[in-house]
């Protein structure tokens, strides 16, 4: 019996260490182990109760629930003939407890959520970004949206293999060809010419807290936050097309491991929420009354951790290019 208990505990620890990053898979394994253990323990207790009630007329159904010692005393006195019964309840209880306390990962609040957001895996997100960028560079935007949207919505094994299992391939797709990069560069130059009349005059550091997607679940913009009014709040959004290719590639690699269920700040917007692991330098013209940035423009990704202080705002000495 002790050997079985030790093996169950060691196996639970091994599962916890092997799948420490995949909470969803750990939760599924924990539910299966907890269910099997509970069924085993309850079955053994039912058999023990049957024999105890049959041999002792003074026991009743209340004793089955409340007086476990009286129920199990006949089984213990008949050892070793009843060893299997005791092993079943001991191992079943151990499997249930180790699944809940060691393996973990069970989302207990899932049945209470009425409006549950789609389960978007980080690998699916970066896979969709890579496919969208590749198809957009090739000029077939509609096909890109349809394929990436199907990958995110259906969550098939092929999608996970492309997104999570083949991250290098996804990033290569995001990179595209030299001709594609040239087209992106030409588009950025045209946008800069069109924006000459509204040149930003300040820069500050913001964090990315959400990825805005379209109806096909293709990433189209990044939501940024900063402490413009003393507390962390939404300050603007940056279009995907306004972010240089290499910066977006770097940020996509960081964000694909930072997807969370709830936003880090109070907001009514809809997006795929991420931890504040990516910071970027943003140029702007000033602040609105609600603390949001006027005409925010992406300048560069920043290698920093944590939430930046808005006091880092500086005035540009020369107009931004």
Image (cartoon, grey):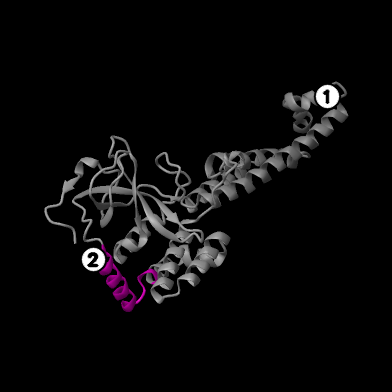
Residue located 21% across and 53% down the image: 200
Quarter of the figure with the N terminus: top right
Which mark is first along the chain, 2 or 1?
1
Query: What span is colored magenta in the figure?
Result: 173-194
User: Vertical placement of 67 versus 33: above or below?
Assistant: above
Residue matched to label 2 = 193
Pinpoint residue 123: horizontal percent, then vertical percent: 46, 60
- Residue 88 visible within the image: no
Other residues around mark 1 within 10 Å, as few (<14) / some (14–19) / many (≥20)? some
Nearer to me, 34 or 195:
195
Q: What residue is drawn where x is 53% and y is 42%?
A: 102
Q: In this orientation, which residue lies closer to the viewer: 256 or 94?
A: 256
Report the residue at 31% width, 73% height from top: 181
Q: Which residue is mark 1?
A: 60
Q: Main secondary structure of the magenta part?
A: helix
In the picture, the quarter occupied by the C terminus is bottom left
Q: How far apart, in angstroms, are the residues tagged by discs 1 and 2?
A: 87 Å
């Amino acid at each position: 019996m002790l050997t079985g208990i030790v093996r169950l505990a060691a196996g639970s620890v091994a599962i916890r260490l092997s799948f420490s990053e995949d909470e969803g898979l750990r939760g599924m394994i924990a539910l299966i182990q907890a269910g099997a253990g509970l069924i085993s323990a309850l079955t053994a207790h039912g058999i023990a109760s049957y024999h105890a009630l049959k041999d002792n007329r003074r026991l009743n159904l209340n004793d089955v629930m409340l007086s476990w010692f009286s129920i199990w005393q006949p089984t213990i006195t008949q050892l070793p003939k009843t060893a299997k019964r005791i092993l079943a309840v001991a191992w079943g209880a151990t499997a249930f407890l180790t699944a809940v306390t060691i393996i973990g990962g069970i989302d207990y609040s899932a049945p209470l959520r009425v409006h549950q957001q789609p389960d978007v895996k980080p690998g699916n997100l970066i896979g969709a970004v890579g496919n969208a960028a590749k198809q957009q560079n090739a000029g077939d935007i509609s096909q890109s949206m349809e394929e990436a949207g199907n990958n995110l919505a259906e969550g098939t094994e092929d999608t996970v293999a492309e997104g999570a299992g083949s991250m290098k391939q996804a990033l290569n797709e995001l990179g595209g060809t030299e001709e594609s990069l040239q087209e992106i560069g030409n588009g950025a130059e045209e946008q800069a010419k069109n924006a000459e009349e509204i040149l930003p005059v300040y820069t500050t550091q913001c964090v990315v807290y959400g990825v805005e997607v379209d109806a096909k679940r293709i990433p189209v913009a990044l939501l940024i936050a900063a402490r413009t009014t003393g507390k962390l709040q939404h300050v603007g959004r940056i279009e995907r097309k306004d972010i240089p290719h290499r910066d977006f590639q770097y940020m996509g690699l960081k964000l694909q491991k930072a997807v969370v269920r709830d936003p880090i700040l109070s907001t009514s917007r809809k997006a795929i929420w991420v931890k504040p692991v990516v910071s970027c330098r943003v140029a702007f013209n000033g602040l609105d009354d609600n603390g949001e940035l006027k005409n925010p423009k992406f300048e560069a990704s920043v290698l920093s951790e944590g939430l930046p202080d808005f006091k880092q705002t500086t005035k540009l000495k020369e107009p931004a290019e």
